[in-house]
Amino acid sequence: MERRKKIIILAVVSGILFGLIEILFFVVVFFISGEPQMPGDKVALVEITGPIYSSRGVISEIHRYKEDNSVKAIVLRIDSPGGIVAPAQEIYRELTKIDKEIVTSMGSIATSGGYYIACASDWIFANPGTLTGSIGVIMRFTTLEELFKRFGIEREVIKSGSYKDAGSAYRKLTPEEKKLFQETIDDVHSQFIDAVFEGRKHKKLTREQIKEIADGRVMSGKQAMEKKLIDQLGGLDDAIEYAGKIAGIEGKPRVIKKRIRRSLLERLIGEADQAIYNQAGLRYELSL
């Protein structure tokens, strides 16, 4: 009888220990990967929030979900006014390489570079009051020439070519420099139109139709729907449900999302990127 009690106690203790080990393993995997490892087919949620001044984090997530066979679809949650051109193009390009369903859900705002990225998806959701569109490019220059003259500040420049200091805050742009920058703006604007044309082919939008509204105008989600720039009115839950449906997931899709944990170094790098963004001239962004 005593021996039987010991066996029962040992079995119970072993079961508890085994359960604790399983929980510990789950917690370790969670904290290493940044997301819970759930069995079965999943929809991955990638958030793009705020000004776009770096592509590193988003592309890292995209690559992870691209290689994860359990992820059958990706939902982009875009809440961004746009940002620097190159990072937006890098994110767009990586998304076009994915052989999985991609659905975009627009939050409060998805303009300019935010809309550019959305064009890489198979289907776009927006709320009726979402601000979107703003298909355009902008460069800003601040001229302090008159202020310097007032305080008697002079500046001499030695340069290798006539355009090397074009855009300097110490003097106004020359007509030739304005023409040069306008040509650059027009080229990048054309690239934006190309991306919209490729992304909205299923709506049979022609380049001429896109050019008519690619003048930087901002529009509501409802207006964008009328212009065929988005596919459906709805929120994030609608986008997730739709992504699961077109990916062939039965029932309510399991959603995984990267858990953001930024070290002090990452925060400092982020602030440095923000400083670069503030100084950069060429942007896809909403100007208010």
Image: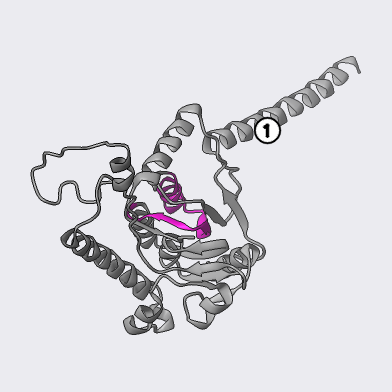
Q: Could you tell me residue 50's position as x and y percent?
A: 51, 51
State yes or no: residue 244 in magenta.
Answer: no
Q: Which residue is the extreme one toward the left? A: 160
**218 vs 227: above or below:** above
Instruction: In this rendered view, identify the residue nearer to me: 190 or 179.
Output: 179
Q: Which residues are magenta?
A: 57-86
The quadrant holding residue 246 is bottom right
**40 vs 26: above or below:** below
Circle count:
1
State yes or no: residue 75 in magenta.
Answer: yes
Instruction: In this rendered view, identify the residue nearer to me: 177 or 282.
Output: 177
Q: Quadrant of the N terminus?
A: top right
Label 1, residues with CA under 10 Å away: few <14, some 14-19, many ≥20: few
Name the residue that disc number 1 marks: 23
Q: Could you tell me residue 48's position as x and y percent?
A: 50, 53
Instruction: In this rendered view, identify the residue nearer to me: 198 or 146.
Output: 146
Q: Which residue is the extreme one toward the right? A: 1
Q: Specify the amino acid type for callout 1.
A: Ile
Q: Could you tell me residue 45's position as x and y percent?
A: 55, 54
Q: Could you tell me residue 147's position as x and y percent?
A: 34, 44
Name which residue lies at 34% across and 58% down: 89
